[in-house]
Image (cartoon, rainbow, N blue to C red):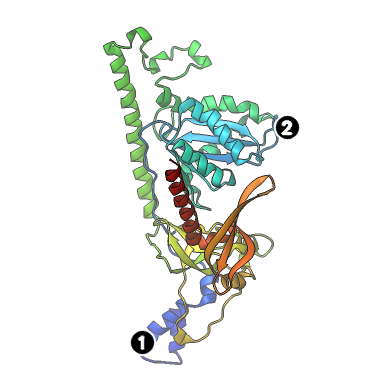
Amino acid sequence: MIKHIRVAQVFYWPKMTSDIKKFVYSCPVCQLTKHKRHAPFGILQPIPIPDKAFEVVTMDFITDLPESNGYNAIYVLICKLTKYAFFIPCTTKLSEKETAKIFFDNMVCHVGLPLQIISDRDTRWRNDFWKEVCEYMGSKRALTTAYHPQADGQTEVLNQTLEVALRAYIKFDRNNWSELLPKIDFAYNNTPHTATGYSPAHLLYGFKPNEPISYILDSNSQNISRPSLEDIMKPESKEFIEEFDGMRIAAKDTLRRAQAIFESNYNNSHYPISFEVGDQVMINAHSLKLPDVTEGKGVKTTRRFEGPFELIDKLSEITYRLRIPHEYDIHPVISIAHLEKYISPPEEFGNRNKLEPLRGKQKATQEYEVTKIVAERKVRKRNRWHMEYQCEWKDYGVTEEWIPEKNLRNAQEVLDEWKNRKQNSKGGMDGMNA
């Protein structure tokens, strides 16, 4: 340890090595500016393999596409078990209600209602409307952690496959991609998937749909012999069902083996660690792409981390909610991959030099604490409905100011308490009316 050697050349005191390490490792400036040499934090938390087709679906948008027949985005839906996918042309101006209609018309009406919907934190399915739709349909939302696309890996990989296919066949003026989607969709769903060994259409329908080449070559040998209506009670129909079930069981076993191998490889290159509520942590300003750090000239000279911030909730072993001032404009639920433990300087070393926070209003934001919500209202802004709340503040009492819900994310416990109280009150009134 170079610093220890330099100090030891001039000074000596008992337990000198321990004191020097404590002083160096708790340096506020060093913790925010230096690279970390350990393996990435967090072990993999795999999503269980579902039992039925379209029991669990994932979805995402591919945006920033050139306009094609009035569309500039693609809505991607994929089954977790069969890998069957829907590629739906749309626009980035879709509201949450329009997105729900596309989801219902293009998927639910064809393959039924999923039990779980996995998506990122896009505003189209992050707000109260989608929550109500899912609860009404009996489905469960599962939003991925911000800046952690591994949580929805299969959709991210499929998006890359779709983008490669579009690059290969799109015209020079790039305005025909919406016309290519049905053909690419058909080709993808009839191609054996590397994870299962079967084509998605084969796993979903039990047979391989005919292609143009099917009328040239005898490819029917690859299909399962499907029983006719008059044979529905014959032993052949039982064999067909058993063969179809066996095919899906084999696909599930293959997915489990692939998932176990991937999980083992992932965990071998990651450091198992967890934080607890009340810990002080720093966020990686570069991996989270904070504008103050990752934009403009001199990026290499900017700090690596920002903080410290208090950890206020542990959602899982790899997902945490932080108390982050809303001026940072990032979601407070962050993956452990973007966090680093902060070591507070011991008081025995006195005042230490510190870097100013990236957001100048951080100190002012931390001085006000919400103790209770007393009222709510729904307001319409930019053609969308938003919730606002009137709050009681510590040392200030109730004010007339209405606070948007997004600005109360550091008071999540108070907000949840208010919503639960309203829900229970509503349930009690419904019981009385009944």
Instruction: Give the SS element for disc 1.
Output: loop
Q: What residue would you read off at disc 1?
A: 15
Residue 238, x across and y down, in percent: 28, 17
**91 on left or right of 85:** right
Asked if residue 186 shows in the view, the reply is yes
**Residue 326: percent from the left, percent from the top?**
59, 62
Question: In the image shown, does 411 or 363 lie closer to the viewer?
Answer: 411
Q: Residue furthest top?
A: 230
Provide the secondary structure element on which disc 2 rests. loop
Q: Disc 2 marks which amino acid?
A: Asp
Instruction: Name above or below for residue 324 compared with residue 166.
Output: below
Question: Does residue 354 appear to the left or right of 342 in the view shown?
Answer: right
Give, as a three-letter code, the residue at label 1: Lys
Residue that protrudes farthest toward the right in the picture = 173
Q: Quadrant of the N terminus?
A: bottom left
Left or right of 258 in this view: 175? right
Of residues 408 and 221, the one drawn nearer to the viewer in this rendering: 408
Q: Which mark is residue 173?
A: 2
Please name the residue shown 44% across and 92% down the image. 11
Direction left: furthest residue: 235
Q: Position of residue 165 (x, y in %)?
A: 58, 32
Quarter of image, res 328: bottom right
Picture quadrant where residue 398 is located: bottom right
Question: Are the residues at dot 1 and dot 2 in contact (C-beta closer than 8 Å)?
Answer: no
Relative to 194, 119 lies left or right: right
Q: Earlier along the polypeptide chain: callout 1 or callout 2?
A: 1
Please, is residue 399 above or below residue 177 in the view? below
At 32% across and 25% down in the image, what residue appears?
Answer: 245
